[in-house]
């Protein structure tokens, strides 16, 4: 769009604003989004790069060949200026959509009068707890559609979203653990693939019909999960990672995100890995992500990470050297200003060559073209008719509710305290700082929500006599304990809303404790003591909490963990507490007839004494010699408060491995298994030497019968693990290899089929990073059932 267009659309916007002010509440949104190759512009429409019948690489090469060096340099940062003489509008690379289109970043512009907000899904850690890839896909898809609707209505000058965050939630104190799908590489990989396919507009199985709906970015590459702990900050932290942990913990989500998810972007992180800042690491960015995994897109730097190559770390001697390191390592778009300011002088000093810039621009402009931004009027794109009414549509709001309902985890339920029969609840006391605090529901990297129903509002809607006392603030250093105790004494039932918020854990703020902040525990215990019946405790938090006191306190009848449950969080929590839905709330008709709590913890809940472990110690495996306990359910040797995958249900479920599942896998291969160094008792096959074809034949199919014994219908994730006969030599205790979520009526059964590959799902990683498959016994585990499979030579 040229200057004329800009002036025109500003005038239009003013007119629109006036109209809106005069004619409320009629909502009209009509303006032209920024696009290149306007057919109405005679000076630009003849350019070769505008000819949509040509392949994109030809078009991009033509565009780059028309740019002056100075113009090229200005296109390397996230806020790129327009190139008016070529009809190319400005573009903002930085937008966020972690759990809904966000207002963080520069590309999306909400407007209180036109499109004030977008559907705010639960924070990712709660959505992960559903273990439901279909749900993850549909959330990604809804976000992609809302992003396009915003763009079509001229509320976006970027469609590149720096989401999802697929770092492994390695340490429970990490402030950004809430943004991730948890501690398990298989879960994080499947989350990445499902979310990215949905957001980018691909099919659930990964087919792409043509134009990208939006662009997703897998971040932060890699081994990033420390923000600020004990004087160690992410900008300078050097993560010392073994080849073994790299291969079987930190890299799998990124690899899946790129290879199967076909994400069009990877973002390098702030930290170093084994001495090298990731944004300056050619092996990581170019050799691995671009060449080995085939990233078809661009690499972005985390914001100011390139500046910090010089400023914070002095890895580079000058800013010119810093931009040189980044561009040569494979960074294509820098978040910040350092490229436009220093690439010119870097060329003069010989730290950057024009071909480095051309490569970066090739990746950047190719993506803008794949988004359809160089195809003339975007109304003619396949996505051109997505209207503003798709933002906060009933369908998307229902999905936000379903996501929260499916994720919420029932941690304790003594004597079926829950669900509460609503008709029996004549008076209800609601206590706690998270009962009526909309920001506590939304987590971070959020956008303005469509609407928010707090737990207090939802409960007030359900029970006429509902009284509230805040009890304390989330920090637990301002209390009103006597008032809360008085309320607890005066009502039939008490529900407490405690836990954390963004002042306790967030980006740049790791926790130092795992227990509840300040006086929260005291308040809970005093209220439980005063209440007539065992109380219900609802915890909002991203990271895990040591709530051993509550687990053991018989006056606390039930505990729910609700993550940060998003805009529909209050409704979701209330529906789970009462085991029913309440169609009147939110003025929406909810089609989901689900009532049971079904989520499972996507992270280990460690005891407080885990805080003795330095957060800087990246090792996953335990070291008994020094008392290092190891990390996550795969390696932790201590006793967790609640384990990964834990979560109760309102119904009882049972599992059976179906008869007829394979018990032996024959490796008819000329290759003989090798005794491994330091491990003479096991013979194993090197996966790399087995090769793709042999591995392709080593399929395992396991069918698991699942039955809901009642009394309630519910959604239920079925988690399949594998384990080895021993945990020696760095073998995990067990490893999640597959999961599916099923909905079962009371009394109903179904069969769940898992297709596994021995090379992928039964293999392990040696200390040198090689993947091997042990000859002999392996076990598949679901619930309390095991099935043995033998690898036979
Ligand atoms: C960057 O340029 C300076 C000055 O020409 C040179 O001394 C330095 O070695 C270069 N750095 C790199 C990493 O190439
Ligand atoms: C409560 O603790 C927070 C830190 O979590 C602190 O910022 C605040 O000043 C404290 N307030 C009072 C009243 O002590
Ligand atoms: C390997 O050999 C066994 C027994 O000879 C046979 O049953 C099996 O089908 C063969 N497997 C493959 C993958 O060819």
Image (cartoon, helix red, strand yellow):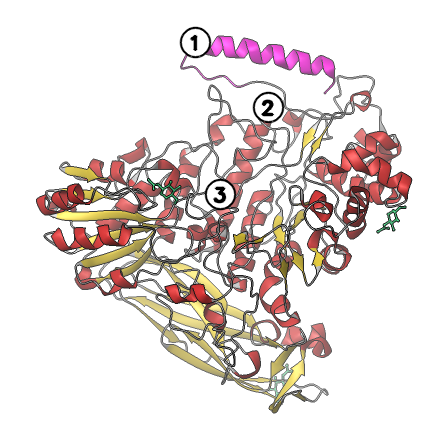
Instruction: Point out the tag, 3 or 2, that comes first from the N-terminus.
Output: 3
Q: Nearer the viewer, residue 484 or 684?
A: 484
From what the image shows, is residue 234 above or below residue 682?
A: above
Residue position marked by numbered label 1 in the rendering: 23
Quadrant location of residue 464? top left
Instruction: Name the mark nearer the viewer: 3 or 2.
Output: 3
Instruction: Tell me the SS state at disc 3.
Output: loop
383 to the left or right of 526:
right
Q: Is residue 25 magenta?
A: yes
565 to the left or right of 731:
left
Q: Is residue 215 magenta?
A: no
Instruction: Point out the tag, 3 or 1, that comes first from the N-terminus.
Output: 1
Instruction: Name the mark nearer the viewer: 3 or 1.
Output: 3
Number of the label disc, if any, that sits on residue 355: none
Does residue 29 appear anywhere in the picture?
yes
Q: Quadrant of ligand 3?
A: bottom right
The residue positioned 76% from the left and 55% from the top of the image is: 286
The residue positioned 29% from the left and 54% from the top of the image is: 560
Expressed as whole percent of the image width and height from the top left, the position of residue 784 reads 36, 76
Expressed as whole percent of the image width and height from the top left, the position of residue 72 reads 82, 33
Q: Nearer the viewer, residue 205 or 781?
A: 781
The residue positioned 49% from the left and 48% from the top of the image is: 509
Question: What is the CA distance from the residue labelled 3 to the residue labelled 1?
Answer: 33 Å
State the quadrant of the N terminus.
top right
From what the image shows, is residue 328 above or below residue 763?
A: above
Question: What is the CA distance from the residue labelled 1 to the residue labelled 2?
Answer: 21 Å
């Amino acid at each position: 769009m040229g200057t004329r267009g800009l002036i025109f659309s500003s005038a239009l916007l003013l007119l629109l604003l006036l109209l809106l002010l005069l004619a409320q509440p009629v909502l009209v949104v009509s303006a032209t989004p920024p696009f290149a190759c306007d057919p109405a512009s005679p000076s630009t429409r003849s350019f070769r790069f505008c000819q949509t019948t040509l392949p994109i690489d030809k078009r991009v090469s033509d565009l780059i060949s028309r740019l002056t060096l100075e113009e090229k340099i200005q296109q390397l940062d996230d806020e790129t200026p327009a190139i008016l003489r070529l009809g190319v509008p400005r573009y903002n690379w930085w937008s966020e959509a972690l759990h809904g289109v966000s207002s963080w970043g520069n590309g999306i512009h909400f407007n209180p009068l036109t499109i004030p907000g977008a559907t705010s899904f639960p924070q990712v850690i709660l959505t992960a707890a559903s273990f439901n890839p279909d749900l993850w896909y549909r959330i990604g898809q809804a976000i992609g559609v809302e992003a396009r609707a915003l763009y079509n209505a001229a509320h976006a000058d970027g469609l590149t979203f720096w989401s999802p965050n697929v770092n492994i939630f390695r340490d429970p104190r990490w402030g950004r653990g809430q943004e991730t799908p948890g501690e398990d590489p298989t879960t994080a990989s499947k989350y990445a693939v499902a979310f990215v396919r949905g957001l980018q507009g691909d099919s659930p199985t990964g087919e792409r019909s043509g134009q990208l709906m939006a662009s997703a970015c897998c971040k932060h590459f890699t081994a990033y999960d420390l923000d600020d702990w004990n004087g160690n900050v992410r900008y300078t932290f050097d993560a010392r990672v073994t080849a073994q942990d790299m291969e079987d913990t930190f890299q799998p989500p990124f690899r899946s995100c790129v290879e199967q998810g076909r994400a069009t972007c990877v973002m390098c992180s702030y930290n170093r890995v084994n001495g090298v800042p990731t944004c300056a690491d050619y092996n990581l960015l170019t050799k691995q992500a671009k060449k080995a995994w085939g990233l078809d897109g661009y690499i972005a730097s985390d914001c100011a990470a390139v500046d910090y190559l010089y400023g914070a770390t002095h890895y580079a001697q000058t800013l010119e050297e810093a931009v040189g390191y980044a561009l040569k390592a494979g960074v294509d778009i820098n978040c910040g200003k350092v490229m436009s300011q220093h690439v010119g002088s870097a060329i003069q000093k010989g730290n950057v060559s024009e071909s480095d810039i051309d490569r970066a621009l090739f990746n950047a402009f190719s993506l803008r073209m794949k988004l359809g931004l160089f195809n003339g009027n975007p109304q003619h794109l396949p996505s051109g008719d997505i209207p503003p009414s798709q933002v906060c549509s009933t369908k998307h709001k229902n999905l936000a509710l379903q996501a929260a309902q499916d994720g919420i985890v029932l941690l304790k339920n003594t004597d079926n305290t829950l669900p509460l029969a609503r008709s029996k609840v004549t008076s209800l006391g609601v206590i706690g700082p998270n009962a009526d605090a909309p920001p506590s529901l939304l987590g971070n990297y959020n956008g303005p929500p469509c609407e928010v129903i707090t737990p207090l509002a939802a409960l007030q809607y359900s029970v006429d006599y509902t009284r509230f006392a805040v009890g304390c603030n989330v920090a637990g250093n301002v209390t009103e304990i006597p008032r809360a105790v008085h309320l607890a004494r005066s009502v039939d039932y008490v529900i407490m809303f405690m836990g954390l918020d963004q002042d306790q854990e967030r980006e740049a703020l790791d926790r130092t404790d795992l227990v509840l902040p300040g006086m929260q525990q005291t308040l809970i215990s005093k209220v439980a003591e005063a209440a007539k019946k065992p109380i219900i405790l609802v915890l909002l938090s991203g990271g895990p909490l040591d709530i051993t006191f509550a687990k053991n306190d018989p006056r606390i009848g039930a505990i729910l963990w609700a993550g940060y449950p998003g805009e529909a969080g209050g409704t979701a929590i209330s529906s789970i507490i009462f085991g029913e839905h309440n169609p009147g709330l939110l003025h929406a008709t909810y089609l989901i007839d689900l009532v049971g709590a079904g989520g499972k913890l996507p992270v280990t809940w460690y005891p407080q004494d885990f805080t003795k472990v330095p957060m800087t110690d990246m090792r996953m495996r335990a070291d008994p010699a020094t008392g290092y306990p190891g990390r996550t359910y795969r390696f932790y040797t201590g006793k967790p408060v609640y384990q990964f995958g834990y979560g109760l249900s309102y119904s009882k479920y049972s599992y059976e491995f179906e008869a007829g599942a394979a018990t032996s896998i024959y490796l008819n291969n000329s290759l003989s298994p090798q005794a491994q160094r330091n491990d003479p008792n096991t013979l194993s096959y090197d996966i790399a030497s087995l090769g793709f074809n042999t591995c392709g034949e080593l399929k395992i199919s396991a069918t698991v019968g699942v039955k809901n014994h009642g009394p309630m219908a519910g959604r239920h994730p079925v988690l399949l693990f594998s384990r080895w006969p021993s945990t020696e030599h760095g073998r995990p205790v067990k490893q999640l290899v597959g999961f599916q979520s099923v909905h079962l009526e009371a009394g109903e059964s179904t069969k769940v089929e898992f297709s596994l590959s021995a090379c992928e799902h039964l293999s392990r990683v040696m200390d040198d990073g090689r993947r091997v498959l042990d000859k002999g016994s392996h076990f598949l585990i679901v619930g309390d059932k095991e099935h043995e499979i033998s690898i036979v030579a």
